[in-house]
Image (cartoon, rainbow, N blue to C red):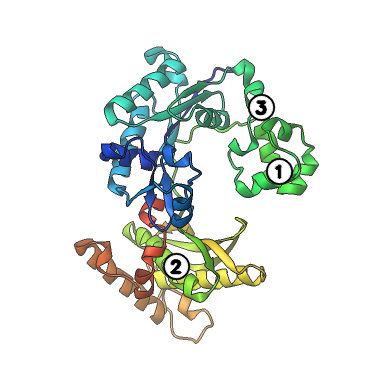
Amino acid sequence: MGEATMLHADLDAFYASVEQLLDPALRGKPIAVGGGVVLAASYEAKAFGVRGGMAGRKARELCPQLIFVQGHFGEYHRLGDAAIGVLGDFTPLVERISIDEAFADVAGCTHLFGTPLEIATIIRRRVREELGLPISVGIARTKHLAKIASQVAKPDGLVAVDPLGELEFLHDLPVGLMWGVGPVTEAKLKGEGILTIGQLAQAPGRSLRGLLGEAAGDKLAALAWNRDPREVEVQHRSRSAGAQSALGRKPATDAVIKPTLRHLADRVTSRLRAKSLVGRTITVRVRFADMRAVTRSMTLDAPIATAVTVSDIAEDLVRSALADHPREKTITLLAVSVSHIGEQGDMQLELPLGLADERLRPGTRPGLARLSADRAMDAVRTRFGRDAVGYAAAQLRRKNSVPDDFRSLAEKDLG
């Protein structure tokens, strides 16, 4: 049995903590980043039941004294980078998985800086002293267990899992702490009487596969026994670009869907074009009122990075998803992503042959016109700011959508 050298560091209530750092008058008070939708909540707000993704009206009902702040996205980037940079001072084996959390393998640097526990203690002290932010750290032999340990350590704590007592530590914890167990999966497991990780570990594999699907069932069964061979991935390149909008509870109508998808497609494709990238697969995710979600995707013959084309495809995919679920009349989230990404090469021009998918092909006259319009907007935004120009329907509905500046913080940078 190896030594516990895997660290998972997670900044506590990061966005809200940054706001309290920037404005000391907010410290100790229940605050939420956002407005129409809660993007993040402080621990003081969470004590009242306020959670990210919650409608602002519901949050105010739970916590009448809740203070909403707009968010300082530039500061989130700066401070998140600085905090993860502290990990890099100890080991080159750092895998950043979001703006505010990362894994670090310190196996090769204990002779320089001390035991993993001593290294984690120094990291937490430096982040607090240099940046003014709380950070929780979990230490274990595996990535999954280190991540769970950091959750147990919250807020502002440190938990090291003894390799000789891993299962005793793990099996008493609620199944919702597991990586990959979201609200829907947790509800399914609860319906079968599986509340703890230990109960999941003892569940027959055939039952889990039937309940969750073969891949998910086998994966969770392995993690429940702390079987996790994954190592830190230092060189991770993003394979997709995406954005999503939490809508609260909205009717599944074109008046909601079309402008939201246009806004999301604009955000995603502008990031692709900024790095001269294109993608071939368009994927949408639709979440219903009961938190169930469905996805649909389409792969094109030629890669694209134009907002209107991605939006048109996304609309078709969403309509397909809704047609398959005719009883669902309310949606709470829409997401769009582009994958199978590569560098923009020479474009093959196409003759107007009247093909059914002509509007989706980048080398046709409509495709070239759409790309030209997007590039013109890119130029204006570069000079005058992103809000200087945009698609009318999407701009008019921006106040009802979760800002993609916030969503993009959790993504890996493209290429």
In the rendered image of this protein, does residue 82 appear above or below residue 321?
A: above
In the rendered image of this protein, does residue 113 appear above or below residue 178?
A: above
Residue 43 in percent (x, y) is at 43, 37
Q: Tag 2 or tag 1, which sits nearer the N-term?
A: 1
In which quarter of the view is residue 226 placed? Answer: top right
Q: Tag 1 or tag 3, which sits nearer the N-term?
A: 3
In the rendered image of this protein, does residue 379 appear above or below residue 194?
A: below
Residue 362 in percent (x, y) is at 42, 73
In which quarter of the view is residue 82 placed? Answer: top left
Closer to the camera in the image, 32 or 356: 32
**Does any portion of residue 335 appear in the rendered image?**
no
Query: Residue 260 — which label?
Result: 2
Query: Residue 172 — which label?
Result: 3
Among all residues in the image, which is located at the extreme left? 383
Q: Tag 3 or tag 2, which sits nearer the N-term?
A: 3
Residue at 34%, 28% (x, y): give it: 86
Q: How many marks?
A: 3
Residue 135 in percent (x, y) is at 40, 30
Q: Which residue is mark 1?
A: 189
Asked if the residues shown at circle 1 and circle 2 are in contact, with their CB atoms under 8 angstroms apart, the answer is: no
Left or right: residue 202 versus residue 11 is: right
**Does any portion of residue 120 appear in the rendered image?**
yes
Q: CA distance from mark 1 to mark 2?
A: 33 Å
The residue type indicated by label 2 comes to Thr
Where disc 1 sits, the SS reads helix
Q: CA distance from mark 2 to mark 3?
A: 42 Å
